[in-house]
Image (spheres, grey):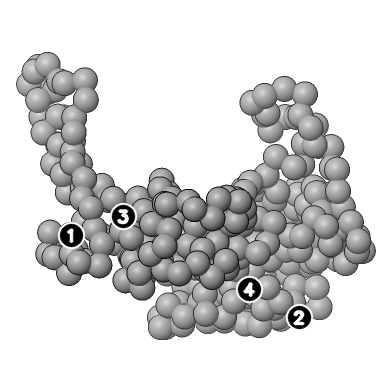
Amino acid sequence: MVIPVRTLVTGAAGFIGSTLVDRLLSDGHHVVGLDDLSHGRPENLDDAHKQDRFAFVQADIVDADLNGLLADIRPELVFHLAAQIDVRRSVDEPEFDAMVNAVGTVRLAEAARRAEVRKIVNTSSGGAVYGVPQRYPTGEDAPAEPASPYVASKVAAELYLASFRSLYGMDCTHIAPSNVYGPRQDPHGEAGVVAVFAKAMLAANPDLAGIYATNEGSAIGAVDAANELKIEPGKVKIVGFDSGKAQIDAIKSGIMAGAITQNPIGIGEATVQAAVDAIAGKQLPKFIDTGFFWYDKTNLEDPKIKAVLYE
């Protein structure tokens, strides 16, 4: 049984933030989303707005009344994703970058302290904080060597939050995503790596017959690239893997030819049977084939296919 928690998500209209909002809501929690909509997209929160456990505040962490906001909503957890993420802009405008990423985080932490927030989950930067590491794989104990103002401001935010933990006992966890991709990503930004690579590949190979994408995120990256290049639907056969709303919609529209999905019901049955056989002392096969399904516009409504798809 899930115990509902009051949460605040900053950067809630971004592609990562909105996905987190949807997950928190689906798990039964209460969510207030905060975003200044300078880059976030309101439509990313369309599903969230359908739930009475969600509220949205359009505000900037740099100048909003965060003390008043957090005093009103009294969140137990704060997920901090609001940020200036453009490395090039940080080089051109380091003061602006520091105001958003460092000062904005300090303002949020102080408001959280006053509102007695239990924990902040802070989104830092991936491997960039370590510069060019001296060893691989790179551990968390590697020294920080910021190579841009963006990374410096992210490191500063981590240190400020660590000081709040030391001074006030406010718990904090840092996550460090690298090149994230998936549904709702901005195909034009420097973080939209799959769409960028797919666009370059399609532009350099106009006779390319098809693309096989190994998960939903890469499939939608290929779809975004094809759309941006105005490639006629069906000219390049884009085949995806697994399920998800964005991929299903792309198949319905004809931009994707179809996709291969796993058989989750078969996986569950085979796993239980293997466990029973193992307990009974039977020899298990080295590989267990749980099967797969192909789906496209012609069979999306087939009950057997609908049973293994999810949105």
In what quadrant of the picture does the N terminus appear? bottom left
Mark 3 vs mark 2: in front: 3
Q: Residue 44, relative to residue 291: is it above or below?
A: below
SS under mark 3: strand
271 on left or right of 82? left
Calculate the distance from the C-alpha at mark 1 to the C-alpha at mark 2. Answer: 50 Å
Calculate the distance from the C-alpha at mark 2 to the C-alpha at mark 4. Answer: 20 Å
Front in this rendered view, residue 229 or 120? 229
The amino acid type of the residue labelled 3 equals Ala
Residue drawn 58% across the image and 73% down it: 13
Question: Which of the 4 image quarters holds residue 283?
Answer: top left
Q: Which residue is mark 1?
A: 305
The location of residue 58, given as percent across then percent down, is: 66, 82
Q: Which residue is mark 3?
A: 259
The location of residue 310, given as percent across then percent down, is: 29, 61
Front in this rendered view, residue 3 or 150? 150
Name the mark on residue 65. 2
Q: Give the mark nearest the N terminus, 3 or 2.
A: 2
The location of residue 32, given as percent across then percent down, is: 55, 75
Mark 1 vs mark 4: in front: 1
Calculate the distance from the C-alpha at mark 1 to the C-alpha at mark 4. Answer: 34 Å
SS under mark 2: loop
156 on left or right of 181? right
Label 3 crowd (10 A; few <14 / some 14-19 / many >=20): many
